[in-house]
Image: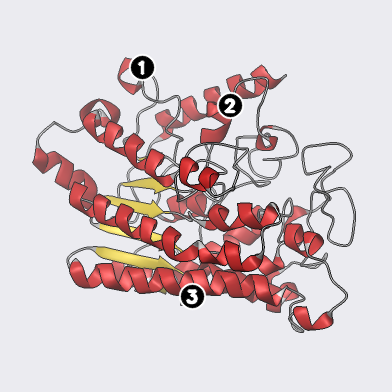
Amino acid sequence: MAVAYVVVFMLIISSSSSSLSKSASGCYESIISFGDSLADTGNLLLLSPSDKLPLSARPPYGETFFHHPTGRCSDGRLVIDFIAESLGLPLVQPYMGGEDADAGGRSFGKGVNFAVAGATALDYAYLEKRGIHNSLTNVSLGTQLDWFKQFLMKLPDNLCVFGSDNTDRRNFFRSSLILVGEIGGNDINYPLNQGINKEVAQSFAPTIVNKIGLTIEELIKLGVETMLVPGNFPIGCFPIYLTQYKTSNKEEYDSETGCLNWLNEISEYYNKLLQEELSRIRELHPNVTIIYADYYNAALRFYLSPSEFGFTKGILRACCGAGGPYNFNISAMCGILPASSCDDPSSFASWDGIHFTEAAYRVITQGLLEGEYTTPHIRTVCPSMSRHPGRYEY
């Protein structure tokens, strides 16, 4: 059965290459993505041996839109999928397994995704030396940047449309939107999950942000012109942490949302540092467009007013889980019996206690495209982006 999931997934992503359409927005003709599980469209699944597939390869993952698991950590589409739709582009294909595009496989002419679920901004070895363990993958942002450089070396073959001179590379970057993240959240998640105190977890933030900044500067040297860089979500609202750090001390919870204050403060601190770093880089490179995506406040809206966004079944509870106050059990996570999925994922914001539902990702994306949750506003950069991400069919 595990092998079957991989085969089915490969057939799907292969067929998508025949459906490539010209960008409806006129702003960007392709998307290049780096990140973790919030943006992974199948890389971890394709990297995993058939006998050790990730939970995202098991039902009920993918049930809402794709009707089967695709390697996405949700019941359906992610922010990157909705952004692609808003640009009139096909869903962005994972880099793994597509390197033989010149031999009749997938073409990356409309985008390529290097994001891997579980990935960190800091190198695997750096974290291991500090007692931080990543059981999902040894892929870091540095690994993904190396893949990107390999991709560029094979640019003509991968795109099947451009020549090999520098002009063609510049034209490719000029018409590409680069998503740098979300990445770095796991560098804080892993210490917290492993019981390391909050002060130590938060102390990683400056180093994480520095790594992201260095990567952005490296991308600029390579010729990238437009980047969208998301911050972290309000992690104090996630069922995994509400379960792990449950306390009778009411003062630790926000009275409006029920989220854990100290965890959200870690996200706020990290996001502040990231925005300061992006401002610094903008001053050094005024001809490069760097857009900050405020994931934190785009998501916080539905914790403050859940019914307004259709989340009527308990905003802090996971749709897919195995019981408990927040429907999260670390020993029976979504995809492992006895965990089961709710009847209507669109009425929940949290899918599996760690990641959002497709409905929540749609709201977040609409907040980026329509609201005031990008700096500079993404519509000043690309005025013709669709205000209402629709449904792209494979």
Tell us which disc is closer to us: 1 or 2: 2
Judged left or right of residue 302, residue 369 is: left
Q: Separation of disc 1 and disc 2 at Cα?
A: 23 Å
**Farthest top residue in view:** 103
Earlier residue among tags 1 and 2: 2
Earlier residue among tags 2 and 3: 2
Name the residue beneath numbered marker 2: 48
**Quarter of the image that includes the N terminus:** top right
Q: Amino acid at mark 3?
A: Gly
Q: Nearer the viewer, residue 194 or 51?
A: 194
In the displayed structure, would residue 377 be above or below residue 13? Answer: below
Q: Nearer the viewer, residue 98 or 269?
A: 269
Please tell me how crowded label 2 is: few (under 14), some (14-19), or many (20+) other residues with Cα within 10 Å: some
Q: Separation of disc 2 and disc 3 at Cα?
A: 38 Å
Judged left or right of residue 173, residue 389 is: right
Judged left or right of residue 134, residue 323 is: right
Earlier residue among tags 3 and 1: 1
Q: Amino acid at mark 1?
A: Gly
Q: Amino acid at mark 2?
A: Ser
Judged left or right of residue 7, residue 83 is: left
Tell us which disc is closer to us: 2 or 3: 2
x, y percent for residue 368: 47, 68
Name the residue beneath numbered marker 3: 371
- Which SS class for mark 2? loop
* In contact (CB < 8 Å): disc 2 and disc 3: no
Name the residue beneath numbered marker 1: 104
Please tell me how crowded label 3 is: few (under 14), some (14-19), or many (20+) other residues with Cα within 10 Å: some
* In contact (CB < 8 Å): disc 1 and disc 2: no
